């Protein structure tokens, strides 16, 4: 859908004019664009807020805007406990439970060390040996 011309009879497409100004000088500011439009087309009435919105949208589409501020009415991101989770310090509880599951007794660690010594320190060979033992189901 093509852009509409302004309400005047001259047939100016304000967005095209603003885009051309930004492409020529991408460091131009919004009020400077408005004054340049008024100088270029002195008989044409321009709405200041409309020109500013068009200027901002074109800069955003061209990737020239520096920051994207959150709109005043936009919902804020929620922080804290997700819905359906128990009240309290649930993260610490899951961390301690996972540490208890991963706890290994010392004799198993010593056996793993002995296996690595027999494999000359090569962990890939040790893993291969463990897979072969698991395939044979030797416990």
Image (spheres, rainbow, N blue to C red):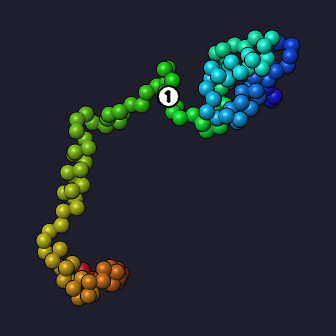
On the image, the x and y values in percent for residue 62 come to 65, 37
Q: Quadrant of residue 123?
A: bottom left
Foreground residue among 53 and 120: 53
- Where residue 114 sits in the image (x, y, percent)? 19, 83
Which percent across, then down, holds residue 93? 21, 45
Going 86% across and 13% down the picture, which residue do you hit? 9
User: Where is 41 relative to 16, above or below?
Assistant: above
Q: Position of residue 137 (x, y in %)?
A: 31, 81
Q: Is residue 74 visible?
A: yes
Q: Residue at x 57, y 34 (%)?
A: 65
Q: Tell which of 13 and 134 is nearer to you.
A: 13
Locate the C terminus and report the quarter of the image it occupies: bottom left
Q: Nearer the viewer, residue 62 or 99?
A: 62
Quarter occupied by residue 10: top right
Please name the residue shown 50% across and 28% down the image: 69
SS for dot 1: loop
Asked whether residue 53 is in view, the answer is no
Count up the numbered dots: 1
Relative to residue 66, is residue 60 drawn left or right? right
Q: Seen in the image, is 51 located left or right of residue 130?
A: right
Q: Quadrant of the N terminus?
A: top right
For disc 1, the marked residue is: 69
Q: Which residue lies at the image location 26% right of the left edge and 44% below the top edge?
A: 91
Q: Is residue 16 above or below residue 62?
A: above
Of 43 and 135, the residue lying toward us: 43
Name the side, left or right, on which 32 lies relative to 109: right
Classed neighbour count for the residue bearing mark 1: other residues with Cα under 10 Å, few (<14), some (14–19), many (≥20) = few
């Amino acid at each position: 859908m093509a852009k509409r011309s302004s309400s005047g009879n001259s047939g100016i497409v304000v967005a095209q004019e603003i885009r051309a100004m930004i492409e020529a000088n991408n460091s131009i500011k919004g009020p400077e664009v408005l004054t340049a439009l008024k100088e270029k087309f002195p008989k044409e009435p321009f709405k200041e807020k409309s020109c500013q919105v068009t200027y901002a949208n074109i800069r955003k589409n061209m990737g020239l805007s520096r920051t994207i501020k959150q709109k005043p009415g936009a919902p804020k991101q929620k922080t804290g406990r997700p819905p359906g989770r128990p009240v309290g310090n649930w993260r610490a509880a899951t961390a301690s439970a996972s540490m208890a599951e991963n706890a290994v007794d010392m004799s198993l660690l010593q056996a793993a060390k002995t296996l690595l010594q027999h494999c000359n320190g090569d962990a890939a060979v040790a893993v291969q040996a463990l897979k072969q033992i698991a395939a044979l189901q030797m416990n």
